Image (cartoon, coloured by chain):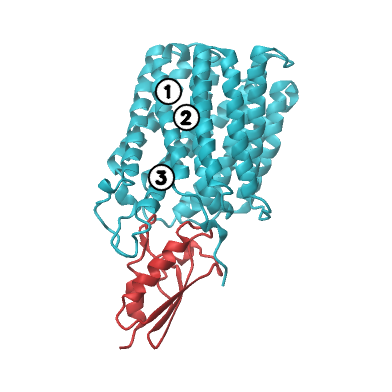
Chain colours: A cyan, B red
């Protein structure tokens, strides 16, 4: 008989919910900002206002969502308690102010203020890494998930340092080489060093759990791990100057991404879960975006395609398609659970309580699915073409999808209030 | 009053995993049911180690079985040996 796992000492559900709520607000703001910035998006991507939009997505939406999910999932996937809940709360406040500051200063193009906000962001990220590091003290079970999560946190640290260097460079130029390759290296360090390993690692534990599926063969995990471990440094070094490493690095990353897509397909095929909820549909559909992302990424690395239009379409497919739809799907799984656990968990066993499905708003989730998946596809095409009208139309679809998603979350979060807890009950314990 | 295995299993069918919407019996989480003179021991698992419902699920199982007429005491033991796999879904309660 095994002893109870330590993971039961997870943080209060309000900690991850705070991060995820802030992330959802940033997602909505970014989706609405796309239409506002359509004329800029029809031009070159290196524009202060587009940098504001990009950092709203990468920091406000993606990073806060991953950090929030991390505080919920570390106890589950790594079976370690979170070291300090209080530090996690403080860190969210620091990060929220820092992200707001960075986005505002990018938008206004005021570089000293940007550097100050970037410094504050580095403090917030440093505190997160400290909290995670202390949570994982003495950790010895180096599973695929654990290795990927470690790679992700290492990538986050390096991306932050790289970003700080770029912010300082704006005030007092000191970085060698050309600016754009250095900027591209920062972007790919964030994408391949922080976001991708976190998604690969967490997916390995939670997709089979949610889909009730057996875990496919280990060779896929090895390809994902080694493809990223070799591809990430090769791509980054290739971008900053060692050009010969760029294409092999891109191919290694493509192998990792393709292997992940195959793995997800196998999990979906082997599922025993009857029916897919919208959260899982989002997550599985997101994986489809890996294929065009890989094709465009490798083509850009090999100079088969070039220019700001292709680069923008690539960014939309990767960040808006694969990453954002994955996060939306996972949030539609995690947020109802956290709310249920907080609002109904203590009452379960003593009185009838609802299931997670009862907390949600399925038709609006379906609308969000149609609008967000369609909107991302349209935006990628419009960004590729470069017409302001097309970008505005796609942005409107995306903004409606983001609004539907946020309304679904608000309805779920409303169950935290006693006023809204008289939900139709299907569960009897 | 004697307590039957069928009564206990039926009581367990009312304990659901809130995320999956399936009962602990249908999920194959119940490894053993032992009954002796109104005392019931349940051996069960969870779909994953570190499941956040770790403490709650065992409590729900205990309370559900306590409601069976004739039950005087319930012990719920959690084990992860053997680990749960999706193959256990639909196998029902142990005989």
Q: Quadrant of residue A186?
A: top right
**In the foreground, A38 or A306:** A38
- How far apart marks 1 and 3 lie (CA) works out to 27 Å
Residue that label 2 marks: A320
- How far apart marks 1 and 2 lie (CA) works out to 9 Å
Q: Quadrant of residue A175?
A: top right
Q: Nearer the viewer, mark 1 or mark 3?
A: 3
**Is residue A284 positioned above or below A35 on the image?**
below
Q: Residue at x 62, y 39 (%)?
A: A129
Q: Nearer the viewer, mark 2 or mark 3?
A: 3
- C-beta proximity under 8 Å, tags 1 and 2: yes
Tell which subunit mark 1 falls on.
A
**In the foreground, B47 or A90:** A90
Q: Is residue A417 left or right of residue A60?
A: left
Query: Mark 2 or mark 3, which has the lower sequence index?
Result: 2
Q: Residue at x 57, y 68 (%)?
A: A3
Tell which subunit mark 3 falls on.
A
Query: Mark 1 or mark 3, which has the lower sequence index?
Result: 3
- C-beta proximity under 8 Å, tags 2 and 3: no
Residue that label 3 marks: A335
Position in image of residue A184 (x %, y %): 63, 22
Are there few (<14), some (14-19), or many (20+) residues within 10 Å of tag 1? many
**Is residue A313 positioned above or below A109 on the image?**
below
| Element class at badge 2 | helix
Query: Mark 1 or mark 2, which has the lower sequence index?
Result: 2
């Amino acid at each position: 008989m095994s002893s109870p796992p330590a993971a039961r000492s997870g943080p209060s559900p309000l900690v991850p919910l705070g991060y995820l709520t802030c992330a959802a607000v940033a997602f909505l703001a970014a989706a609405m900002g796309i239409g506002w910035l359509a004329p800029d998006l029809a031009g070159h991507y290196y524009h202060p206002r587009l940098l504001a939009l990009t950092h709203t997505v990468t920091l406000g939406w993606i990073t806060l969502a991953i950090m929030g999910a991390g505080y919920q999932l570390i106890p589950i996937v790594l079976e370690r308690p979170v070291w300090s809940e209080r530090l996690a709360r403080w860190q969210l406040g620091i990060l929220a102010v820092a992200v707001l500051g960075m986005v505002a200063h990018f938008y206004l193009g005021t570089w000293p203020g940007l550097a100050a906000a970037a410094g504050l962001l580095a403090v917030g990220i440093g505190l997160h890494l400290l909290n995670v590091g202390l949570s994982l003290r003495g950790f010895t079970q180096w599973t695929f998930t654990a290795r990927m999560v470690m790679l992700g946190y290492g990538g986050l640290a390096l991306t932050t340092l790289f970003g700080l260097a770029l912010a300082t460079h704006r005030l007092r130029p000191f970085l060698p080489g050309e600016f754009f390759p250095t900027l591209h290296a920062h972007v790919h360090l964030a994408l391949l060093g922080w976001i991708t390993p976190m998604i690969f690692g967490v997916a390995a534990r939670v997709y089979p759990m949610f889909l009730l599926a057996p875990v496919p063969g280990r060779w896929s995990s090895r390809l994902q791990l080694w493809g990223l471990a070799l591809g990430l440094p090769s791509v980054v070094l290739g971008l900053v100057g060692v050009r010969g490493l760029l294409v092999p690095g891109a191919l290694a990353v493509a192998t990792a991404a393709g292997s992940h897509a195959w793995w997800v397909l196998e999990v979906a095929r082997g599922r025993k879960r009857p029916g897919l909820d919208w959260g899982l549909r989002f997550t599985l559909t997101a994986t489809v975006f890996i294929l065009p992302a890989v094709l465009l990424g490798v083509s850009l690395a090999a100079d088969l395609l070039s220019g700001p239009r292709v680069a923008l379409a690539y960014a939309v497919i990767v960040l808006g398609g694969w990453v954002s739809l994955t996060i939306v799907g996972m949030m539609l799984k995690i947020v109802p659970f956290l709310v249920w656990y907080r609002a109904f968990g203590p009452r379960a066993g003593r009185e009838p309580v609802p299931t997670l499905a009862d907390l949600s708003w399925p038709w609006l989730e379906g609308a969000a699915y149609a609008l967000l998946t369609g909107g991302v596809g349209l935006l990628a095409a419009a960004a590729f073409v470069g017409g302001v009208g097309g970008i505005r139309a796609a942005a409107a679809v995306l903004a409606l999808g983001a609004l539907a998603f946020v309304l679904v979350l608000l309805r779920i979060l409303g169950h935290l209030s006693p006023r809204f807890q008289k939900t139709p009950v299907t569960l009897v314990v | 009053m004697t307590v039957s295995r069928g009564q206990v299993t039926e009581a367990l069918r009312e304990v659901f995993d809130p995320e999956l919407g399936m009962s602990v019996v249908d999920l194959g989480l119940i490894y053993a049911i032992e009954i002796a003179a109104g005392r019931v021991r349940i051996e069960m698992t969870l779909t994953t180690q570190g499941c956040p419902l770790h403490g709650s699920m065992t409590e729900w199982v205990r309370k559900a079985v306590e409601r069976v007429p004739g039950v005087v005491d319930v012990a719920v033991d959690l084990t992860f040996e053997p680990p749960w796999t999706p193959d256990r879904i639909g196998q029902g309660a142990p005989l």
